[in-house]
Structures are given as C-alpha cells and as structure tokens.
Amino acid sequence: MENRVHPDLRGLLSLMPQEDFTKETLLEIRKASGASFGPAAAPDDDVTIRDEFIPGPEGAPDVRVRLYTHGKKAQDRPGVLYIHGGGYIMGSPEMCDGTCRKLVSEIGCVAASVDYRLAPENPYPAPLDDCYAALKWFSSHADALGVDAGRIAVTGASAGGGLTAALSLLARDRGGPAIAFQAPLCPMLDDRNVTPSSFEFTDKRMWSRAKNLFGWEMYLGDLCGKDIPLYAAAARAGDYSGLPPTYTYVGALDLFRDETTEYVSRLNQAGVPAEYHIYPGCFHAFEVFTEVAGISRRAEEEYILVMKNALTKK
C-alpha cells in the first residue's frame, strides 16, 4: 500500500494505528478519535462559537447545534449546515472546529454544526432525524442569525457525507427546507459494499472494509439484512432528480471511490449539476492532514472555493 500512497501522505500512513472495531472497543476508539479527527482549529478572534440547544425530533432529546459566526454583524449571509463524520458511530462538532472556522472566515457564512446522536445507541433514523431538525431550525431562524434562507448549503465528510446526501433526499421529498447546494465529501453512501473499491482496501490503518461493515451494521441496527430505506443509504434511492447542485471528492485509495463515482454519474443523468474530483494516491479522510500534506490543503482549498462560488449571490 505504501507504494500507492501519494508522497505527501506516505509518512503519515506509517504512523496511523492498526485498529479493529468492535462494540467492546468502541468507547475507547471514540475517546482516541477526539484528539485526532479533523484539522486543528486555527485561532481567529473574528469567529465566535456558541452552542444552541434546539428542539429535537418528536419524542427525542434536544439537539445541540454548534454555531460559528463572524464578529462583524451582517445580514443576508449564506448558511452552511455542517455534519461531522465518524462512520455513524463516533465524532462530534468540536472535532471539526477548524473546518467550520475556515468556512466562516473564507466564505463569509454562518456555519451550524450538528451534534447528532450516534449509533449503535441510536441507530437510523435517529442521526438523520437530528440533522433534519437542525436544518429546519437553521432555515426558520435564518433572519435572526443573519442568514439568507435561500442560500443554505449542507456539507460533511464520510458519514457526514452520507447524511448530507440522505438529508438532501429527505428535504426534497418533504418539500423543504430548501437546500441551495450540497457537498457530501468522500461520502458513506452504500450499505451493500459491493463495488470493486469496497473489496479493495483491507489495511487496518485505513477506513477498511471491516470497519465499514461494522459502521453500517451499527447504524442500521435491526434493519440489517432487510429492506433498507433509501434515506438510510442514499445509494439506494431510485430517483436523484430535483436534488441540489453538488460537489464532492474522494481519494483514489478510498473504499468509497466507486460508490461516489456511481453517485455522481447518476446525479448527472438525473439533470443535477455535479462536480467531482478524485485525488490520486489518497486514502479515506486524507483531507484532515492540511497542516502537513500539500494535497490535503489543495483538496480543502478547492472545496471551500467551490462552496464560496456556489453560495455567492448572483
């Protein structure tokens, strides 16, 4: 595998731990991931962060939404709903502070990051329901937040990308709230794990086939092996028409490569504008290493530029 990895990332691969995911080890894995998931948050006195607790889905607890705003008061700014990754089983908004700060600073938006419930304690549809509740709250409170409700985008990576794609389908089918743009990055879309790339990557240092199967099993819970709702795994949707314009990327050494390629192809076939970049020699979550890897910085810069252009008022 080392010979296939991009030179910018080769040294990092050797430092990554070999892990097996089980229900018994999940708590420790969550604790460890809290220190390493995502780029560090660059200090920026002009970006303020505060937590809001919003009404959750019916019968469920309140949902914590982490808000990032620029110090300068302004109205009519774009909004970005951010959904963290972590295989549906780990992760938190705090681990994406750096990314959300950059989105706010460089796009001039207000960002809202969702602390959705995690599997296996809360399997589908709980995480998606929390994200939908956050989208509704963000849209309905747009004026108070200084946001243009017509320019709200949704984005996230890995499981956050899978939830982004599912949320866009759900919002379309429920008649809103409107999503102006979506960026499901290196998305976790297909529980079936039948593409060539889903079999190709078994290295325990990466997000491997075994980890992916475990993540889906935890997320789907009692639905495993049964009829899976299209909102649980966006690759299962039969109709992609009417979805928002889309940007995504994936690494060539990511087991999600082929399902992402198929997703983008089907979006384009459905008449949805979709832009796609495959980064050679890059494994899953390569984009978090922006402090040390030039190719990671390039992926982040392109992603933010595309988001900025998509959300700029024409």
Image (spheres, helix red, strand yellow):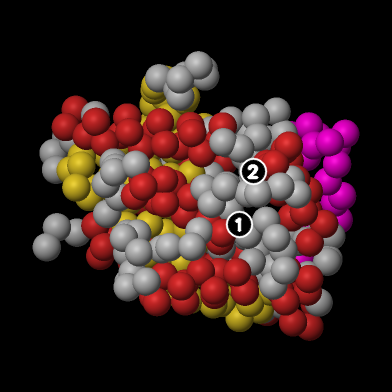
Per the rendering, the mark at residue 188 is 1
Q: Nearer the viewer, residue 53 or 39?
A: 53
Residue extent of the magenta highlight: 13-31
Confirm or deny contact between disc 1 and disc 2 (CB under 8 A).
Answer: yes
Q: Earlier in the sequence, mark 1 or mark 2?
A: 2
Please check the rendered image and state whether residue 124 is part of the magenta-colored stretch, yes or no. no
Mark 2: which amino acid?
Answer: Tyr
Residue 88 circle label? 2
Of 10 and 121, which appears nearest the observer? 121
Q: Is residue 23 magenta?
A: yes
* Residue drawn at x 72%, y 68% as measured from the top left: 194
Q: Is residue 192 visible?
A: yes
**Whole-percent x, y for residue 71 in the image:** 25, 35
Q: Which mark is residue 288?
A: none
Asked which quadrant contains residue 7, the reply is bottom right
Q: Which image quarter: residue 50?
A: top left
Which residue is at a point 45% across and 24% down the rendered structure image?
57
Compared with 51, 123 (above or below) is below
The quadrant in which the N terminus is found is bottom right
Q: Position of residue 63 (x, y in %)?
A: 47, 24
Left or right position of 295 against 175: right
How crowded pointer 1 is (Cα within 10 Å; few <14, some 14-19, many 20+) is rated as many
Which residue shows up at 63% across the image and 49% down it? 228
